């Protein structure tokens, strides 16, 4: 419960779980009187049927407008909570259930907390969600409706993560935050995006581009393609492109300055808007992993603006019938900007659109 009445800030939107065919599984997964083996089997059934396998479609209107052929759009907004974060939320809650935890904790500015709260409800375990005191997001209501406990903490997102990690250590809770001991589970979950792209294209595309904040999604997708390549499934590893908001992401800044590691920004210089909030970080928790993925794949990192993200979201709605969160278009914008400067040769290109707009 929370005492705050909040106004909208971030704009991703969830959807109900698909329902009737999962009724028995939903009951068993959350039932503490059922054996752990049965609960895990039921939860896995729900996970596999509800999360992932998102659409990969040709952006044909954008192709005609830009001249970039074989542009594919991977829309993660069809996940239950409306973003790619369901992938890691359900994967970690399943791990928590398997290991005997009865509570998970996570810090959030909205989207990830909503994903974890729903995943925990389905598993019949508690979620304690820490939210920075100054944040205003309508997703609080979703988190509460899934039965999660909300705790307001002083400071910013990064400080909320630290508080959540300390809570996990002190009370023996499952820590679902990025940048911690469970990062391998998160990377593997996001690696499924690479496998899904491969299943459709039967090889790796030339470039995969996506928004970056903490960097976990980019690092996980890259790891998935590395695995496919090493197993002889693909002929190459795609160039990875990360894009974020101007001057407010350490991964992009560190790449552009050719820094050895992902170095934090000055927190006092960070200014958020209702558009760029999902991308803003002063300390990207998996930044080194993302930076290495970009460099080892000969990719790049770039900035984009609120105006450009809003315009692209409108264009995708009008031309491609995709209701995309503006911040989720950052990677696509950077790909098209680079193509405009120096046209890419005929190949296949994938832009991951990470969230659905309400």
Image (spheres, rainbow, N blue to C red):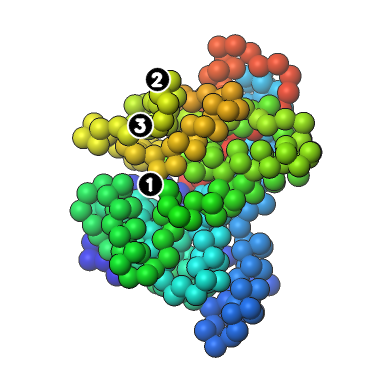
Q: Which residue is drawn at 30% across and 60% down?
A: 166
| CA distance separating discs 3 and 1 | 26 Å
Can you tell which mark lies on residue 10?
A: 1
Q: In which quarter of the image is residue 274?
A: top left
> In 3D space, how far apart are the residues under numbered discs 3 and 2 (Cα atoms)?
10 Å
Q: Mark 1 or mark 3, which is nearer the start of the sequence?
A: 1
Residue 55 image label: none
Determine whether label 3 and label 1 are within 8 Å by CB: no
Of residues 233 and 10, the one drawn nearer to the viewer in this rendering: 233
Which residue is drawn at the image coordinates 72% and 37% (left, top)? 229
Question: Which residue matches tag 3?
Answer: 263
x and y percent of residue 295 in the render? 54, 26
Sequence-first tag of 2 and 1: 1
How far is disc 2 from disc 1 in space, using C-alphas? 29 Å
Report whether 45 appears left or right of 122. right
Residue 194, percent from left and from top: 66, 42
Question: Total label count?
Answer: 3
**Contact (Cβ within 8 Å) of mark 3 with mark 2:** no
Q: In which quarter of the image is residue 142?
A: bottom left
At numbered mark 2, what does the secondary structure look like: helix, strand or loop? loop
Residue situated in front as seen by the camera: 165 or 194: 165
Whether residue 248 sits left or right of residue 214 in the image: it is left
- 14 with respect to 191 (left or right): left
Badge 3 or badge 2: first in the primary sequence: 2
At 65% from the left and 73% from the top, the residue drawn is 41
Tell me the quadrant of the picture where the N terminus can be found. Answer: bottom left
Residue placed at 38% from the left, 47% from the top? 10
**In the rendered image, which residue does mark 2 sit on?**
257
User: Tag 1, which secondary structure?
Assistant: loop
Residue 33 vertical placement versus 237 (above, below): below
> Is any atom of residue 200 visible in this view?
no
Residue 107: percent from the left, percent from the top?
35, 55
């Amino acid at each position: 419960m929370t005492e705050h009445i909040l106004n909208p800030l971030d704009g991703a939107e969830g959807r109900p779980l698909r329902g009737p065919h999962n009724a028995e599984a939903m009951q068993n997964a959350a039932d503490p009187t059922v054996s752990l083996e049965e609960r895990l089997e039921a939860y896995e059934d729900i996970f596999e049927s509800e999360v992932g396998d998102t659409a990969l479609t040709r952006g044909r209107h954008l192709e005609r407008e830009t001249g970039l052929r074989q542009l594919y759009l991977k829309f993660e907004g069809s996940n239950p909570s409306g973003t790619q974060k369901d992938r890691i939320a359900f994967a970690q809650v399943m791990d928590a259930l398997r290991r005997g935890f009865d509570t998970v904790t996570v810090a959030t500015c909205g989207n990830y907390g909503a994903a974890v709260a729903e995943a925990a409800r389905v598993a019949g375990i508690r979620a304690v969600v820490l939210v920075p005191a100054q944040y205003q997001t309508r997703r609080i209501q979703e988190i509460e409706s899934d039965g999660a406990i909300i705790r307001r903490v002083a400071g910013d997102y990064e400080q909320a993560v630290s508080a959540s990690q300390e809570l996990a250590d002190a009370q023996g809770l499952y820590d679902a935050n990025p940048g911690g001991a469970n990062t391998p589970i998160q990377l593997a979950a996001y690696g499924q995006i690479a496998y899904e792209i491969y299943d459709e294209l039967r090889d790796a595309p030339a470039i995969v581009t996506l928004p970056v904040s903490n960097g976990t999604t980019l690092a996980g997708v890259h790891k998935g393609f590395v695995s496919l390549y090493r197993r002889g499934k693909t002929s190459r590893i795609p160039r990875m492109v990360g894009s974020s908001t101007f001057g407010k992401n350490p991964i992009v800044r560190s790449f552009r300055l050719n820094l050895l590691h992902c170095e934090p920004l000055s927190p006092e210089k960070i200014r958020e808007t209702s558009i760029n909030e999902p991308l803003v970080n002063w300390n990207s928790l998996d930044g080194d992993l993302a930076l290495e993925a970009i460099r080892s794949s000969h990719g790049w990192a770039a900035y984009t603006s609120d105006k450009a993200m809003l315009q692209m979201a409108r264009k995708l709605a009008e031309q491609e019938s995709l209701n995309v969160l503006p911040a989720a278009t950052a990677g696509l914008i950077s790909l098209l900007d680079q193509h405009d400067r120096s046209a890419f040769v005929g190949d296949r290109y994938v832009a991951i659109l990470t969230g659905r707009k309400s």
